[in-house]
Amino acid sequence: MKLFLTSAGIVPEITGDFLKLLGKEPKNTKLVFVPTAADLEEDKWFIGKDKERLVELGFIIKEIDLKIENEESLLEKLRDTDIVFVEGGNTFYLLDWVRKSGFDVAVKEFIGRGGVYVGVSAGSIITGPNIESAGWKYADKNIIGLKDLVGMNLVSFAISPHYCDEVIDVVKEAVTKVSYPTITLTDLQAVIVNGDRAEIIGPGAKITFNNPKVK
């Protein structure tokens, strides 16, 4: 199992670690880009930024929209794919379409055969046991009224992205109300999951709650 869970994409500070995890040249890989979480955002500037960065690194991008896919089509499209890159946006909306499209099933098959999952913000949050952390801070709101907040359970810990001084108190209070481990990530950090091993990378303090098993 290989996952690269980020707060703000493949920023320069963590690029070397990502390429090492990938283990092959970007030009020799097939990358599927999933922008669905950004559907509800008025300003989608971050999609352009992340695509530009991937192209800069040498990746050729194929984009899929979960709203027009199903489990069968996703299994087929991910079959010869090396990387699935799940963009940020509204986490609640994204998880809803992950379930409706069958992406949750297809991505587990993809990861199980050695594919690399890359998450950005919402794309990272949905990999955990619960997506409650998306609503802990000011940006992400459950505007679709999603009732079931259980994540894909690809990892045993929750991700709280975009961690900074302004949200420290909010996050510290929120984690006292949950039992699962939580990892905070600044916009310069990521979590690498490689098999049973998880490690926080990038500059700055490694701040976690409820004892996640990470380095």
Image (cartoon, rainbow, N blue to C red):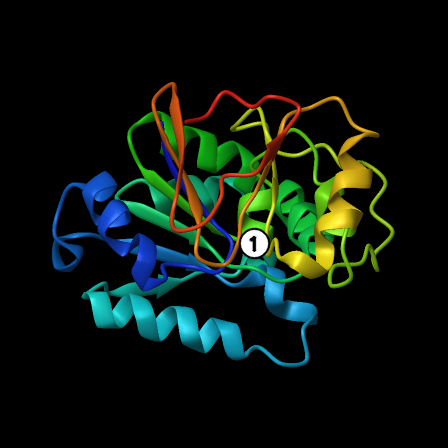
Instruction: In the rendered view, tell whether residue 149 sits above or below residue 166.
Output: above
Q: 10 Å neighbourhood of mark 1: few (<14), some, or many (≥20)?
A: many
User: If the image is split into quadrants, where does the C terminus sit?
Assistant: top left
94 displayed left or right of 64 = right
Residue drawn at (53%, 42%) of the image: 103
Q: Is 202 drawn above or below residue 79 in the view shown?
A: below
- Residue 73, image x and y in percent? 45, 46
Image coords of residue 87 (percent x, y) = 50, 59
Which residue has dot 1 on it? 121
Which amino acid is tagged 1? Ser
> Where in the figure is residue 26, as x and y percent of width and height?
17, 56
Q: Name the residue: 61% across, 53% down.
A: 163
Q: Is residue 112 left or right of residue 141?
A: left
Expressed as whole percent of the image width and height from the top left, the position of residue 41 reads: 67, 73
Can residue 175 be seen in the rendering of this structure? yes
User: Is residue 81 shown to the viewer in this render?
Assistant: no
- The answer to whether 142 appears left or right of 190 in the picture is right
Count of picture labels: 1
State left or right for residue 197 relative to residue 152.
left
Q: Nearer the viewer, residue 36 or 10?
A: 10
Which quadrant of the figure has residue 2?
top left
* Quadrant the N terminus occupies: top left
In the image, is residue 27 above or below residue 151? below
* Residue at x-position 64% and y-position 69%: 39
Mark 1: secondary structure: loop
